[in-house]
């Protein structure tokens, strides 16, 4: 697939764990981005993840003068509740038929932790496949890179190429044979926007596939070495300092203009990113808006 170029794009952080200073926005544990992409006079609006509280998400959208009805598609970066809970409520607010919902084929599997206690953390029953389809969503489930429009594509299932990156949390699932196995989060996908002069923009949910692996895959898909921006969560919040340093060092070897990382990234990783990238790095916050 030859990846074409977007003419321009804006990205608004409509949900994140923290909010801009003196803003009216509500924070929540999770992320959601509104991506407005333009190609040859066509504009398409994609909601990337929905956080875990649709009321807070809709509150922020109202404060930002964003009408849910403008959304043309939804990308779910992975199964976790803090990215998918309320997707059916958002479909109801959007009020369209056959709205594309793009995700990995395994997104509806059982996904759980058992420490400190048993808890399902994947897609909840209220947002099941049947409920999504009953409320106007049309599921596009693929592990291949998926083009939403020329210049805007998902990574597809991310190849694990590094030897130091991990999922970041002790997750389990049950396979078809009824065996409990480690869940490697194969469903973790990201979004890549391609620009002729500025390179690529990478939008992540939690980076359970490893942010360096994601960047490597985005560079491979786009055939572009220059990265205008990386925006999202890196899931280094519980990572040992050694892994954080290896991750940031590996990122520094790429040609990256800016990084905006939050949600599950963690303070120590944010501090290390700032230490290495200086003013090219800022913590992610609800209410931020980027123009490319």
Image (tube, grey):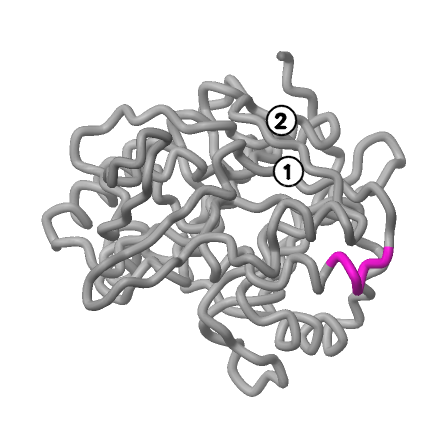
Q: Position of residue 122 (x, y in %)?
A: 44, 53
Q: Is residue 201 left or right of residue 270?
A: right
Q: In which quadrant of the rendered image does the N terminus lie?
A: top right
- What kind of element bears circle 1? strand
State the predominant SS element of the stretch in magenta: helix
Q: Position of residue 140 (x, y in %)?
A: 67, 32
Query: In the rendered structure, which disc, 1 or 2, sits on the residue that comes first in sequence?
Result: 1
Say few, some or many: other residues with alpha carbon within 10 Å of mark 1 (under 14 / 14 to 19 / 20 or more).
many
The residue shown at (68%, 42%) is 101
- Number of numbered callouts drawn: 2
Q: Is residue 47 magenta?
A: no
Q: In which quadrant of the rendered image does the C terminus lie?
A: top right
Residue ID for mark 2: 146
Residue ID for mark 1: 102
Q: Nearer the viewer, residue 207 or 39?
A: 207
Is 6 rendered above or below residue 49? above
Q: Nearer the viewer, residue 103 or 247?
A: 103
């Amino acid at each position: 697939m030859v990846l074409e170029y977007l003419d321009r794009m804006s990205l608004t952080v409509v949900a994140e764990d923290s909010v801009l200073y003196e803003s009216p926005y509500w924070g929540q544990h999770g992320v959601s981005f509104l991506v407005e992409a333009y190609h040859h006079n066509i504009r398409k609006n994609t909601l990337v993840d929905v956080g875990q509280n649709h009321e807070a998400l809709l509150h922020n959208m109202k404060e930002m003068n964003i009408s849910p009805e403008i959304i043309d598609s939804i990308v779910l970066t992975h199964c976790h509740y803090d990215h998918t809970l309320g997707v059916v409520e958002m479909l109801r607010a959007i009020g369209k038929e056959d709205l594309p919902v793009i995700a990995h084929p395994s997104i509806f599997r059982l996904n759980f932790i058992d420490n400190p206690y048993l808890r399902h953390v994947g897609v909840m029953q209220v947002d099941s496949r049947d409920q999504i389809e009953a409320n106007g969503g049309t599921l596009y489930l693929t592990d291949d890179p998926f083009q939403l429009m020329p210049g805007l594509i998902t990574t597809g299932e991310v190849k694990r190429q590094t030897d130091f990156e991990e999922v970041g949390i002790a997750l389990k699932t049950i396979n078809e044979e009824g065996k409990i196995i480690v869940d490697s989060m194969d469903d973790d996908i990201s979004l890549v926007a391609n620009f002729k002069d500025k390179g690529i923009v990478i939008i992540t949910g939690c980076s359970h596939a490893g942010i360096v692996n994601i960047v490597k895959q985005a560079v491979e898909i786009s055939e572009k070495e220059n990265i205008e921006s990386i925006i999202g969560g890196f899931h280094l919040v519980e990572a040992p300092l050694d892994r954080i340093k290896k991750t940031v060092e590996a990122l520094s070897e790429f040609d990256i203009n800016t990084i905006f990382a939050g949600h599950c990234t963690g303070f120590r990783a944010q501090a290390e990113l700032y230490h290495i990238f200086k003013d090219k790095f800022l913590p992610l916050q609800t209410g931020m808006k980027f123009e490319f």
